[in-house]
Amino acid sequence: MSKPIRHYDGWRIRWTDEHGRRRSKTLQSKTDAELELRHRQLAAEERKLGLRPPERKAKFFHHAADWRRSRRTAAFRPRFSRSCFKATSQFQ
């Protein structure tokens, strides 16, 4: 069981989520940090056991649009992308 550690002007908590990834968060008071740490560890354990639904991150259209804009290159060919869509629609 981990406990909050001092981090500059606040308290840092570290826990492992249901996928085994290490997570951390910084809070202002030690009591808030202890309470949040217990809550996060309990939630992760319940998700591992299937007692709680998995945590979902909000996905927004502007994130997808930004990603699409970043993937565009100078050699982008709209005709090629249309032909890819046509080819994949044949298999549906």
Image (spheres, rainbow, N blue to C red):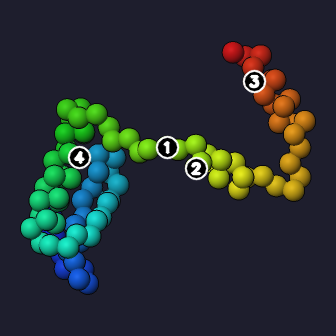
Q: Which circle's residue, 1 or 4, is located before the other in the chain?
A: 4
Residue drawn at point x = 33 percent, y = 42 percent:
55
Q: Position of residue 37 (x, y in %)?
A: 17, 59
Q: Are marks 2 and 1 in contact (CB under 8 Å)?
A: yes
The Cα atoms of the two marked residues, 1 and 4, are separated by 21 Å
Mark 2 lies on a secondary structure that is helix
Which mark, by number, is residue 69?
Answer: none
Let me know if residue 1 appears in the view: no
The residue where tag 2 is placed is 63
Mark 1 element type: loop
**What kind of residue is marked 1?**
Lys
Q: CA distance from mark 2 to mark 1?
A: 7 Å
**Amino acid type at mark 4:** Ala
Describe residue 59's horizontal placement relative to residue 7 as left or right: right
**Residue at position x 81%, y 23% from top?**
86
Question: Which mark is in front, 1 or 4?
Answer: 1
The kind of secondary structure element at disc 3 is: helix
Q: Residue at x 65, y 53 (%)?
A: 66
Residue 70 percent across, percent down from the top left? 71, 56
- Label 4: which residue? 44
Earlier in the chain: of badge 3 and badge 1, it is 1
Where is mark 1, residue-wise? 59
Q: CA distance from mark 2 to mark 3?
A: 24 Å
Q: Which residue is mark 3?
A: 88
Name the amino acid type tagged 2: His
Q: CA distance from mark 4 to mark 2?
A: 27 Å
